[in-house]
Image (cartoon, rainbow, N blue to C red):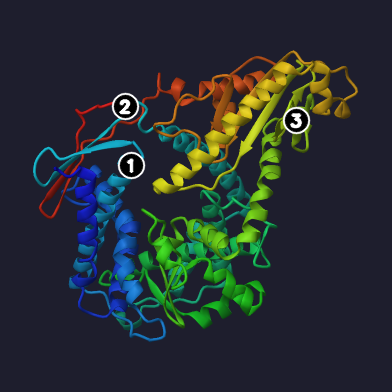
Amino acid sequence: MTKRASTLLKEIVEMETLRIKDTFSGPSYHAIQHILRRLDFVMLFYNDAPGKTEQEVEELREFYNYGWAPALKPFYNDIDINTFEPFPEMYKEAMNWADGIIQFSGHIAFLNQLVEYEKADLIKLETPKENEFSFSYVVENAGIEYYDRKSRDFFRDMIVERMIEEKKKKDNLNEEEIKIKLREIIRNPSGKYISYDATPEIDDYYKKKGHYFVLRLQGYDEFGENDIFGGIEYWKYLDLVETIIGVAIMHTEACLELTKINPKVDLHNLLTYTFYKDKTLDIYKNYFGTSQSEMEQIFSCITLNKENFSYYLDYPAASLPMYVQVSENMLVRIVSGCLGNPFELLNRELKRKFEKDYFEAVNKREDRFRNELFHLFPYEKLIKIPKGININLNGKKTDIDAVIFDTKTMTLGLFQLKWQDPFRKSMRERFSRISNLFNKASEWVEKVEYWLTNTDISNIIETLELRKYTREDVHINEVHVFVLSRNNINFTNVDGLDERVAWGTWYQMIESQAIVKSSSDNVIRDAFIKLKTLSPKNRMKTEKIPELPSFETTFGKYRIYYDKENKTSH
């Protein structure tokens, strides 16, 4: 019996994974240092290359995204953090090995991801010839997640960036002056390394740049500033992350300045630095005025260590951490991790280490989401009920997360607000988000529609407490129902959403209010129509999903490629 393509790929993945550790004969600590330093250089500076197309460069970077974690894991599993190892310099052979093993591991992870995509009914895998594997999409709406990303990008580029520009003007930052002062304090020990003692003025400048950087990231606002994790407010975790990001920006710019002063220095030996853990904690403890135990706890949540590496390094294309602990008292700071998205590890660690606190914080999200929704509609004519409302008819119980009523047009808006954690490439997490979102949301829609259809207008008004917030006469001319998800709502292979409802992400709601024009004075109806206008179904008519370019790669004796001509549909 011929084996399925996915079965063959799984066997290849399992077999080739075992070879990673055998590619390096030196100490595992040296392997880790080489991998991390090469990662910093590639992820920060490898954006073009002579003789390579933009697509080829992007593909290589993607293999790095997928490959760093499986490349690191066997070596990190092997090190004894109770043993201190001397600092190894980066050299050409080590760089070539790191390149090879990260890309090798990236191919393994990519093959495994193809198997997971087929399990999720997103692609079809085939073996047209021996040692060849092709994949093709099996649904017409493949890639509609693009529209979620597009709306999130709109929010970042048009809303957040404008806010940052206003902050910059208020902060009155003089970038050129700071660059000159930074250059003056740079030292070049042994002609190979870098050192500098930043002044308070330089520190303050880069602390602000760290703040601006955080504002652009997804994940920093998943919790409220005053939520408590392990007895420490979330804003303290945020403050440390912002500060370290600012330091990483300063360090990167200092390294680049040094290459101008001494073109012979190798960035591999400058960017990624190893620090004594106790001294690092003391510096930040004194800077923030916190206790040793507090700083130790916060640092543990942004550091890859022996407690968390086994689960975190299994996530496909996980974000790089800010630090990696390599001995009891040694930390490696990864600049590209600081300038990636450190909230992926931080927020996962808060959930793992402080589960009770995590779920208490999650339960507060509805109030925060509701308040942000209300701020989107700053009109005095609107009644905004400052709490969720429970409804019950013939045993069909549910709650309405947000209620907005237009007292001039007598239009009612009912909202369900879903705030799920963001996810990256994990198909298991994707399935969890889909199951939790659509099953519950569809059930909610049915109960709300049943209640609206079978309840007198006067009882609806009384249940929603509309008269409590206005002296004007209240009746209801029309009702519009919304389901808003904080991060994701459009998924390939998920369709058939109830057309009576406007579905969208929080960022699509914001984008629709900003770009879809209307001259009507019916705010609620307009919001409904605007959000519907930006649904993938409508957007596809004028904004096509970017077509996946031709793709082909080799892995040993195997050829893997995207079969664009095979458009099988379920």
Drawn side of residue 107 relative to residue 85, left or right: left
Relative to 402, say whether 428 is above or below. Answer: below
Q: Earlier in the sequence, mark 2 or mark 1?
A: 1
- Residue 252, position as x, y percentages in the image: 41, 64
Q: Earlier in the sequence, mark 2 or mark 3?
A: 3
- Residue 333, position as x, y percentages in the image: 43, 70
Quarter residue 400 falls in = top right
Q: Amino acid at mark 3?
A: Ile
* Foreground residue among 98 and 445: 445
Q: Which residue is mark 3?
A: 391
Q: On the rendered image, what quadrant is the C terminus found in?
A: top left
Q: Residues within 10 Å of mark 1 (few under 14, many from 20)?
A: few
* Dot 2: element: loop
Q: Residues within 10 Å of mark 3 (few under 14, many from 20)?
A: some
Q: Which residue is mark 1?
A: 119
* Dot 1: element: helix
Q: Which residue is mark 2?
A: 570
Between the C-alphas of marks 3 and 1, the distance is 39 Å
Q: Amino acid at mark 2?
A: His
Q: Which residue: 44% across, 34% down?
A: 491
* Residue 269 seen in the current view: no
- Residue 105, position as x, y percentages in the image: 25, 59
